[in-house]
């Protein structure tokens, strides 16, 4: 049986926009185990990204609880929450979020350096990961010198450098053509299998969602399976 990693119970998230109250999540339950591959599917505005941000510790719910390996995120100190985001969770975003002034190698190293990994070890691990994602000849290239698919590969390497147990990908193929998007999905699935990393992908693309053994549909802030 896969190792239980994270439980979310009754998650609610509301935003106040001017005089409007926007209910994005209205009571979501989710269980993720080690090695799972889960696709969150739904139209824009249904709460997919919000749910990823909550379980990854980037935002906090208005109600409900998130439990990671038996510990409530709501009880984490700010330092422990930062450590959780940095070491236990890897994030891959649609827009890559690479620092333009840094090379591919430096972008990947940065996350490890924040985790206080020694510089030489971080550089070695980053080079190995970039080679694994097919960029061994692009280490010294800056984002402006890379294609969209190559930038997303850098982002994936960056997300994996601290060996997270949970990988969260928000529309990882959204800015890519279908062929490149397919390559990125093959890569994510391969890395998940190799490392037994739990993979949760938010997508509006039915073809991407169909690759996951478990698909969860979000409709009006509620979960349908």
Image (cartoon, rainbow, N blue to C red):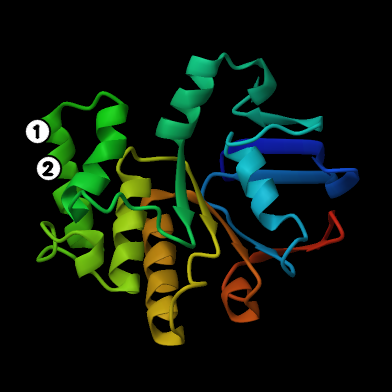
Q: Are marks 2 and 1 in contact (CB under 8 Å)?
A: yes
Quadrant of the drawing holding the N terminus: top right
Q: Residue at x 29, y 58 (%)?
A: 154
Please name the residue shown 74% across and 55% down the image.
47
**From the image, which quarter does the C terminus lie in?**
bottom right
From the top left corner, tell me how far across and down residue 82 is, in percent: 48, 25
Q: Nearer the viewer, residue 159 or 4?
A: 159
Measuring from the top left, give residue 29's x and y in whole percent.
80, 44
Can residue 67 be seen from the camera position used here? yes
Q: Is residue 134 visible?
A: no
**Left or right: where 130 falls relative to 151:** left
Above or below, 2 against 184 in this view is: above
- Relative side of 115 to 167, left or right: left
Q: Nearer the viewer, residue 84 or 146?
A: 146
**Residue of label 2:** 124
The number of callouts visible is 2
Which residue reaches farthest front? 18
**Coordinates of residue 30 in the picture (x, y in percent):** 74, 45
Q: Position of residue 55 (x, y in %)?
A: 63, 39
Instruction: Tell me if mark 1 has few (under 14), some (14-19) or many (20+) residues whose alpha carbon lies within 10 angstroms of its own.
Output: few
Identify the image quadrant of residue 219.
bottom right
User: Residue placed at 54% from the left, 17% from the top?
Assistant: 78
Identify the residue at horizontal 62%, vertical 76% (top origin). 205
Secondary structure type for disc 2: helix
The residues tagged by marks 2 and 1 sit, at their Cα atoms, a distance apart of 6 Å
Q: Nearer the viewer, residue 190 or 116?
A: 116
Q: Report which quarter residue 209 is drawn in.
A: bottom right
Label annotation for residue 120 = 1
């Amino acid at each position: 049986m896969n190792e239980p990693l994270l439980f979310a119970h009754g998650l609610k998230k509301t935003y106040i926009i001017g005089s409007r109250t926007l209910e994005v999540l209205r009571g979501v339950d989710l269980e993720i185990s080690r090695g799972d591959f889960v696709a969150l599917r739904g139209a824009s505005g249904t709460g997919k990204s919000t749910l990823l941000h909550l379980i990854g510790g980037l935002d906090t719910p208005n109600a409900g609880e998130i439990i990671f390996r038996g510990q409530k995120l709501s009880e984490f100190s700010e330092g422990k929450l930062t450590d959780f985001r940095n070491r236990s969770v890897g994030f891959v975003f649609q827009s890559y979020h690479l620092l333009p002034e840094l090379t591919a190698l430096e972008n990947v190293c940065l996350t490890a350096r924040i985790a206080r990994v020694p510089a030489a070890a971080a550089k070695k691990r980053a080079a190995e990961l970039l080679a694994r994602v097919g960029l061994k000849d692009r280490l010294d290239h800056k984002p402006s010198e890379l294609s969209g698919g190559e930038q997303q590969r850098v982002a994936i390497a960056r997300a994996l450098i601290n060996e997270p147990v949970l990988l969260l990908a928000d529309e990882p193929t959204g800015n890519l053509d279908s062929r490149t998007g397919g390559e990125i999905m093959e890569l994510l699935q391969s890395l998940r299998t190799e490392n037994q990393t739990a993979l949760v992908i938010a997508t509006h693309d039915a073809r991407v969602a169909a690759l996951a053994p478990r698909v969860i549909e979000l409709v009006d802030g509620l979960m349908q399976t």
